[in-house]
Amino acid sequence: MQNIVNEVESKCREAKSAARKLALISTEKKNNALLNMADNLVRRSAEILAANEKDLTQARTSGMGAAMLDRLLLNRARLEGMAQDVRAVAALPDPVGEIFDMRTMPNGLRIGKKRVPLGVIAVVYESRPNVTIDISALCLKAGNAVVLRGGKEAVHSNVALANLARQAATEADLPEGAVQLIQSTDRAAVSHLLRMKDFVDLLIPRGGAELIRYVSQEATMPVVTGGIGVCHIFVDRSAQVPQAVSIAYNAKVQRPTVCNALDCLLVHADVAPSYLPLIAREWASAGVEIHGDKRALSILAPLPSLKLVPATDEDWGKEFLSLTVAVKVVDTMDEALEHIERYGSGHSEAIVTEDYSSAMRFLDEVDAACVYVNASTRFTDGGQFGLGAEVGISTQKFHARGPLGLKEITTYKWLIFGSGQVRP
Amino acid sequence: MQNIVNEVESKCREAKSAARKLALISTEKKNNALLNMADNLVRRSAEILAANEKDLTQARTSGMGAAMLDRLLLNRARLEGMAQDVRAVAALPDPVGEIFDMRTMPNGLRIGKKRVPLGVIAVVYESRPNVTIDISALCLKAGNAVVLRGGKEAVHSNVALANLARQAATEADLPEGAVQLIQSTDRAAVSHLLRMKDFVDLLIPRGGAELIRYVSQEATMPVVTGGIGVCHIFVDRSAQVPQAVSIAYNAKVQRPTVCNALDCLLVHADVAPSYLPLIAREWASAGVEIHGDKRALSILAPLPSLKLVPATDEDWGKEFLSLTVAVKVVDTMDEALEHIERYGSGHSEAIVTEDYSSAMRFLDEVDAACVYVNASTRFTDGGQFGLGAEVGISTQKFHARGPLGLKEITTYKWLIFGSGQVRP
């Protein structure tokens, strides 16, 4: 136990000390670190894959399922993909150093803000080892030191990748200690990390609902929570039916295991009889199971070869992360808005409509990170929103909402240029 | 106990429900609510002062000291001052509704952000009853509902002021429940409030170090901490001596009881012999007591009628909030920067220098909310920084740093205008 405490504390302390120097490092050096990282992912792939193989062997022995094994797997193609992503981050503009809101006050003080790194960012994540590289690259680019704590099942891969990231940083003359990986796989390491308020400026949990709940309850430092997306699409009475089919199909089927996929379709009663059979047939061809309310079922029941299940109370507000969707017929837009307010998770919500006032009302009244008119919720993503990359997606309102890019892992300080001013 | 839990929970719930409607209220109505509030502070002053008299009587009976009694005291002039401040907030631009960062993506999606209220802001504060009005006005103006929990000693004044604010809001057609005051004076009410994560979007503690520590440890929702200012001024070797005297005098003496007042003066050894006697004489005329290190004392000891005390370890990093100052002679700017890094609270730090490179280095390397060149730290204030007013001063890095104006108690949501886009 004391070993775990010592490891966590000494690594957080080293990260803090590195962060002070990292805040002053040139963009060029930070970019060089990222380019080294990308090169080494390819050049040293044998070493990384050997470490990954150890994790895979253990996982197979312990009876891990195919989907989880796939998340854990690295191969040459995936390493090359990771290297590409790191090069893309290197190519993004550096957020640090921007001076903004500068003004001259009546007393001659020049007052403004300068964008600076947050300091130390700790990330607690589960199986996928590529997160080790993604997060290291984003944090370093924004001038932050990083403390990583990956899943137990990926520990060999994570150690190899974090070593690679650390060496890439050091070779580019970044301060020692800017990339830290907590190797202890004991849960006590996470619980101790959550107490490191003096060294960690922001903690990001990336994983399932249980991890996120635990971290937001126990952390003593600021936390960005998110990643839980209970997403709705409301097909308004005035929707263009083919467009509504294409959007709801894409939002459910294009990648059903992610947080911005569709969970619940709300359909205006006026359009339900013409619309529901069309979307249901498309979904059926992709293997989607529909949990429908009574009115949806009464429209869909006569159709052949649909997977239909009567919806229960648990279906509303559920994040399915699979080819299942809840469907409900509503009589009014008010009913749709109330449903979203009650069951949405504040992630991504969409309306499909041709009615201008309905579109504007939906944008105004829905309280979520991302509110869409006539587009798929699948666009909620740092890359798609033009941020280049993301460390996560926030569903809280504080600090940043939606995809978190480089700018969102920085803060600012006030600069005041005086010439002897004193307060009267 | 159950009564307390019920009061806290029902008031937070009502605030949440009001917040949803308040987010959509026009600027004009919000301003009307504030103007009503200002008018009623003057018109109904007899009623407020009668309530305040009850608090004062109890406080005198319980043996409260003169400084605390003065903080508690309301009179006609103070009520008029409060009304003026509320009118000033009404005159500020409404931050809500601003659309920014709007761009068209290559796929034709128009993506941008819209500024929206945070929702429900809870504030836990101590003796001064004017906070009840200040915070209500700022929160309502930014479209937030507010849950207030003032000090036990001011409960009669706070009830009268919160009633006034609530009525002013309702008369202006703002939703019922937008202003809530928790009347229970039991500490359990605060501890229960800290668990109201589902209803409270941001909690701001305003008070002493103990309150702030307790709240940041126990709160389950985001917290803005601040208000603890251990402020340094570094007088560099190249400083203009008269300017450095005027700045250090102002920062220590103009209002010594506040967080942006000077706590520790660091003086470069080259300028200490000429500078220290001058500032010490000025301070002596205002009754300032100097806790000096050995070198400072050896310079100052020969001078008549100074209050000199040898500094102890506890003097470094101490927020004095009184006419006491710590003074240390340093040999280099590095030593000054290290001292500030070790002992500063991240609030306000200043350098006095004529050397351009020293000024730039200080601005770059000091990690604090507000970093000054050649000006008094006393300017750290929402009004002085051009924000019009402030709900507090943040010394954390997350969300907002330094004075928190109207914009800092808002957040944003992403708006996405599509024309049928789906993700390939």
Image (spheres, coloured by chain):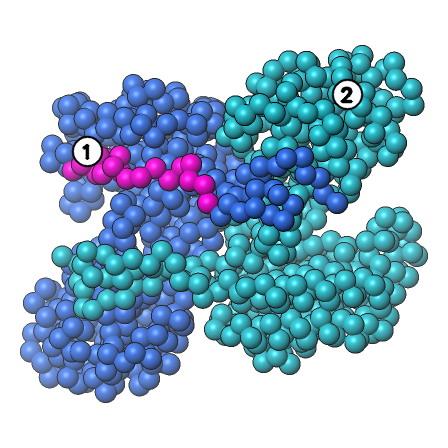
Chain colours: A blue, B cyan
| Side (left or right) of A366 relative to B262 | left
The range drawn in magenta is: A81-100
Please name the amino acid that badge 2 sits on.
Leu
Image x and y of residue A214, in percent: 44, 47
Is label 2 on the same chain as label 1? no
| Side (left or right) of A148 relative to B291 | left
Between residues A69 and B214, which one lies in front from this camera angle? B214
* Mark sitting on residue A7: none
Between residues B277 and A66, which one lies in front from this camera angle? B277
Q: How far apart are labels 2 and 1 at the CA level?
A: 58 Å
Instruction: Please identify the quarter of the rendering in which residue A336 is found.
Output: bottom left
Q: Is residue A73 one of those drawn in magenta? A: no
Q: Is residue B60 above or below residue B140?
A: above
Instruction: Please identify the quarter of the rendering in which residue B78 is found.
Output: bottom right
Q: How many marks?
A: 2
Question: Subunit of mark 2?
Answer: B
Image x and y of residue A291, in percent: 22, 72
Image x and y of residue B351, in percent: 62, 28
Give the structural element (helix, strand or loop) at label 2.
helix
Q: Residue at x 53, y 47 (%)?
A: A103
Please name the amino acid that badge 1 sits on.
Ala
Q: Is residue B138 above or below residue B37?
A: above
Residue at the disc numbered 1: A83
- Crowd band around label 1 with a 10 angstrom C-alpha radius: few (<14), some (14–19), many (20+): many
Q: Residue at x 22, y 34 (%)?
A: A87
Image x and y of residue A130, in percent: 24, 37
* Mark sitting on residue B276: 2
Q: Is residue B166 visible?
A: no
Q: Is residue A342 visible?
A: yes
